[in-house]
């Protein structure tokens, strides 16, 4: 089971890319506050933002938000 919260994954990927919150915000077209709130767990991303972040970090939506696979996966 994945034990990191999505906010930890966002921050981990951002730091690995060597970007500040401000740089990520500018690159994907949101405010720095939005990125800060995501990383601190104050808000959840919209579906559109989640896909932008996945593309930006060159990963999958499920990698960014692993709980989605468990909650919404139809078997």
Image (spheres, rainbow, N blue to C red):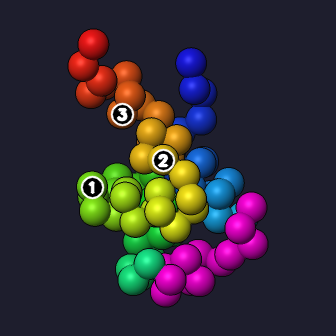
Q: Which residue in the structure is indicated by mark 2?
A: 60
Q: Can residue 32 be seen in this view?
A: no
Give the residue displayed 28% in from the left and 62% down from the top. Answer: 48
Give the residue displayed 56% in from the left and 59% down from the top. Answer: 58
Percent position of residue 17, x then y: 71, 68
Q: Which residue in the structure is indicated by mark 3?
A: 68
Helix, strand or loop for the magenta stretch, by majority:
helix
13 is higher (above) or lower (below) than 26: above
Q: Which residue in the structure is indicated by mark 1?
A: 47
Label pair 3/2, CB-CB below 8 angstroms? no
Percent position of residue 69, x then y: 38, 28
State the CA–CA distance, disc 3 to disc 2. 11 Å
Q: Earlier in the sequence, mark 2 or mark 1?
A: 1
Q: Earlier in the sequence, mark 1 or mark 3?
A: 1
As helix, strand or loop, the secondary structure at mark 3 comes to helix
Percent position of residue 61, x then y: 43, 47
Q: Earlier in the sequence, mark 3 or mark 2?
A: 2
Q: From which residue to which does the magenta span run? A: 16-27
The mark closer to the camera, 2 or 1, is: 2
Decide if residue 74 is on the left or right side of residue 21: left
The mark closer to the camera, 3 or 2, is: 2
Q: How crowded is mark 2: few (under 14 residues within 10 Å), some or many (20 or more)?
A: some
Give the residue displayed 38% in from the left and 80% down from the top. Answer: 30
């Amino acid at each position: 089971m994945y034990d990191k919260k999505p906010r930890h994954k966002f921050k981990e990927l951002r730091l690995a890319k060597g970007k500040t919150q401000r740089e990520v915000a500018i690159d994907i077209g949101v405010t720095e506050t939005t990125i800060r709130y995501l990383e601190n767990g104050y808000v959840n991303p919209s579906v559109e933002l989640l896909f932008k972040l996945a593309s930006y970090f060159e990963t999958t939506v499920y990698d960014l938000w692993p709980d989605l696979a468990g909650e919404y996966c139809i078997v």
